[in-house]
Structure formats: structure tokens, C-alpha cells
Image (tube, helix red, strand yellow):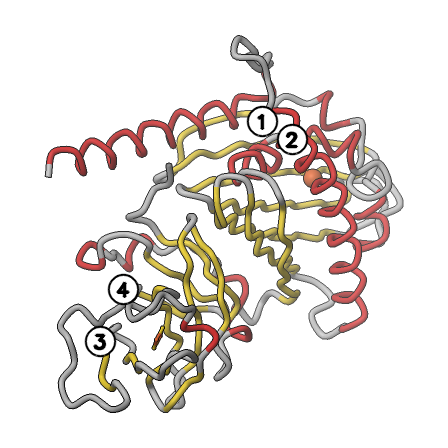
């Protein structure tokens, strides 16, 4: 079960081109394309004629022509042309999804189009803020999006999973603070006067001890923004600071697979391309380490005994709060549907 009346990231702007692309979201087949006038369009990828994928067809101006028998659909999903026919059956239409393109990412509202609410668009503005620089990439994870969310909400795993990059023993030595924040959940961990992690030694040039703060904001249904700020300890003789935003949009492909769109933005070395390359490479490697665990977790939890329950500890506070919130929202959306 997924929340439908929410914004999900469907893709990067650069993926919307005049060649249609199929992408499954929330277990539904969608076709993404860019019309000749430059509009990003998302339609149901199942032709109402014989069920062929519209993504095997081609873009004609604003519209998309099915690659099987040429039924042509405009961005509203209305069929505007059937070769050899003068009338078009009323049922010849596909679902069209509400789309907002912003900061180089494309967001889709998966529920009732009349309820699409722009004010609820998740905030990823760092992607286009001149004070920040970085890159964004895609990773497919063969695991439920909730496992990916929990991975990001409990960064103590860095000590073990990311020994070579983000690892620092300090994550397990310093407790988290968990609170509700906006529509979601915030987890904060302050680690004053610690040894910098290999990542920050390399990226920020830190040699001495640092004050390191992690702040993780989860916004339903699947948006996680991590702010990491590292600065030299006062009086250490070093005067450096570095800050990153890790932007994570975890769009369910289905119950067992996640489209993981991530961005990594920094506020220093703004003009240095080589720093961007290094940070992206390090982060990519880091996420591959997560992927290896997450995909195994999915396999093992798929066949768990009926009475198996996870053992929760203090560091799971953020995950537990997020899961409860999602359960509540899912129940509310489901109940509303039942009442109709
Ligand atoms: S299946 Fe699309 S036009 Fe026939
Ligand atoms: Fe990780």
C-alpha cells in the first residue's frame, strides 16, 4: 500500500527527452516524455486500444503516438487521433498525472489530480541555489523504500557499513534527539570535538578535531534531507567549516524496489569541478555499500517467520516515529477511500 495523494520524484529533468521512457512508480506503468514545446509529461503507459506500452511509440509535437497502431494522446491523456477513423470512442483515453518540474527534478502527484497541492512539494531548493554546488544521481535499490528511509534515519550504521568513508565511532557514542518537524520527523545528533571521518578529512581538509552535527528531516511519503555541518573545534588552531545537504527522494517502484534519486550539495569550493567529482564518487561508493545491505535485508525479511519482530533500541527513535507517521497517513488515506 502506498500514499497516493503525495508528491514523488519521477525523474531528473535531463531524463525527459523527446524519446518516451517507461518508468514504474507505485506499481503503475508510466511513460515520461518531453513535448516539442518543452513540457514534461507523464501518462499511464498502457494504450487503451490493445494495451501496448505508449513508451514504445513516439512524440509528435505535444502528443504521444502509440507504437502499435498509432492512437495519439495529448498531455491530458485524451486521444486526439486514430488512423483511419473519423470518430474517437469516449473511452479512448489514458490517465494523465500532475507534474511539477523544479530545481532540475520532476515531481509527480500520484493521487487525485484535483487534490494536487503545490504547497506540499518537498523542499530540494539547494539543487538550484547559487550558494550550493554538487550533483544528483540515480540508484535502483531492490528493496522496499521504507528500508532505505530507515537506513537514512539511523546513521549509526556508518560506523560499520561505511568504515572507509563516513565511518566514525562517535556516531554510536552520541545520542540522537528525535522530534516531530513540519509534516514529518527530525533526528539530530551533535558530536562535539570528534575525530573527523575519512570523508571530511578528504573533502574539507580537516586534520584536527571537529564539531560535527547531523540533522535528518523526513517528510512523508519518502523525502529525506540530511544536513551535515562540520567545523574545527574552537581554539584548535584550525578554522575550517564545511556543510553538505544530502537530498534523498525514495520513490517506490513497487513494494520491493526503489528508485533512489539523490543529490549531494556543498557550500564550499563552489567553483572546483574536481571536488564535485570526488564527492560524487565517494558518495556513490557509500550508497553502494548501503545497497548491498538493503537488498539482503529485503530477501531475509521476505521470508521471516510470522512471529519475527525487530528489536528496537534508542537509535531507532527516528525510524519508529517515521513508521508510525506513515502508518497513520496510510490508514487515513485508505479510510477516506473506503468512505467514498
Ligand atoms: S495498442 Fe496502441 S494503438 Fe493499438
Ligand atoms: Fe549509509
Mark identifier at residue 302: 1
State the separation of the CA atoms marked 3 and 2: 41 Å
Query: In the picture, which quadrant includes the C terminus?
Result: top left
- Image coordinates of residue 167 in percent, x first then y, are 80, 36
Give whichever of discs 4 and 3 has the lower sequence position: 3
Nearer to us in this view, 296 or 86: 86
Q: Along the horizontal axis of the image, is 171 left or right of 328?
A: right
Secondary element under disc 3, as helix, strand or loop, is loop
**Measuring 37% from the left and 69% from the top, which residue is drawn there?**
42
Mark identifier at residue 299: 2
Give whichever of discs 4 and 2 has the lower sequence position: 4
The residue carrying mark 3 is 78
Mark 4 in CB contact with mark 2 (< 8 angstroms): no
State the separation of the CA atoms marked 3 and 1: 40 Å
| Residue 232 appears anywhere in the view | yes
* Crowd around label 4: few <14 · some 14–19 · many ≥20 (10 Å): some
- Image coordinates of residue 92 in percent, x first then y, are 21, 72
The residue carrying mark 4 is 95
Amino acid at each position: 500500500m502506498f500514499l497516493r495523494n503525495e508528491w514523488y520524484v519521477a525523474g531528473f529533468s535531463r531524463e525527459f527527452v523527446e524519446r518516451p521512457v517507461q518508468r514504474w512508480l507505485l506499481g503503475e506503468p508510466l511513460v515520461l516524455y518531453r513535448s516539442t514545446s518543452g513540457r514534461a509529461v507523464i501518462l499511464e503507459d498502457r494504450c487503451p486500444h490493445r494495451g501496448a506500452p505508449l513508451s514504445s511509440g513516439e512524440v509528435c509535437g505535444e502528443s504521444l503516438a502509440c507504437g502499435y497502431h498509432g492512437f495519439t494522446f495529448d498531455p491530458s491523456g485524451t486521444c486526439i487521433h486514430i488512423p483511419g477513423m473519423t470518430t474517437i470512442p469516449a473511452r479512448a483515453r489514458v490517465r494523465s498525472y500532475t507534474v511539477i518540474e523544479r530545481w532540475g527534478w520532476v515531481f509527480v502527484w500520484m493521487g487525485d489530480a484535483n487534490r494536487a497541492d503545490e504547497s506540499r512539494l518537498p523542499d530540494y531548493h539547494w539543487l538550484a541555489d547559487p550558494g550550493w554546488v554538487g550533483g544528483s544521481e540515480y540508484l535502483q535499490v531492490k528493496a522496499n523504500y521504507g528500508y532505505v528511509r530507515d537506513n537514512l534515519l539511523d546513521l549509526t550504521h556508518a560506523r560499520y557499513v561505511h568504515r572507509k568513508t563516513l565511518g566514525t565511532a562517535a556516531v554510536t557514542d552520541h545520542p540522537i534527539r528525535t522530534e516531530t518537524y513540519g509534516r514529518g520527523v527530525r533526528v539530530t545528533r551533535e558530536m562535539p570535538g570528534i575525530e573527523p571521518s575519512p570523508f571530511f578529512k578528504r573533502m574539507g581538509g580537516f586534520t584536527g578535531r571537529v564539531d560535527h552535527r547531523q540533522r535528518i528531516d523526513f517528510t512523508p511519503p519518502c523525502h529525506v534531507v540530511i544536513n551535515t555541518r562540520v567545523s574545527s573545534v574552537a581554539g584548535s588552531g584550525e578554522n575550517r567549516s564545511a556543510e553538505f545537504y544530502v537530498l534523498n527522494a525514495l520513490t517506490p517502484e513497487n513494494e520491493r524496489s526503489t528508485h533512489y534519486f539523490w543529490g549531494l550539495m556543498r557550500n564550499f569550493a563552489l567553483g572546483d569541478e574536481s571536488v564535485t567529482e570526488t564527492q560524487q564518487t565517494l558518495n556513490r561508493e557509500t550508497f553502494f555499500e548501503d545497497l548491498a545491505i538493503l537488498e539482503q535485508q529485503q530477501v531475509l525479511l521476505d521470508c521471516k517467520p510470522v512471529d519475527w519482530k525487530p528489536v528496537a533500541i534508542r537509535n531507532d527513535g527516528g525510524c519508529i516515529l517515521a513508521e508510525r507517521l506513515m502508518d497513520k497517513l496510510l490508514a487515513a488515506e485508505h479510510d477516506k477511500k473506503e468512505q467514498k
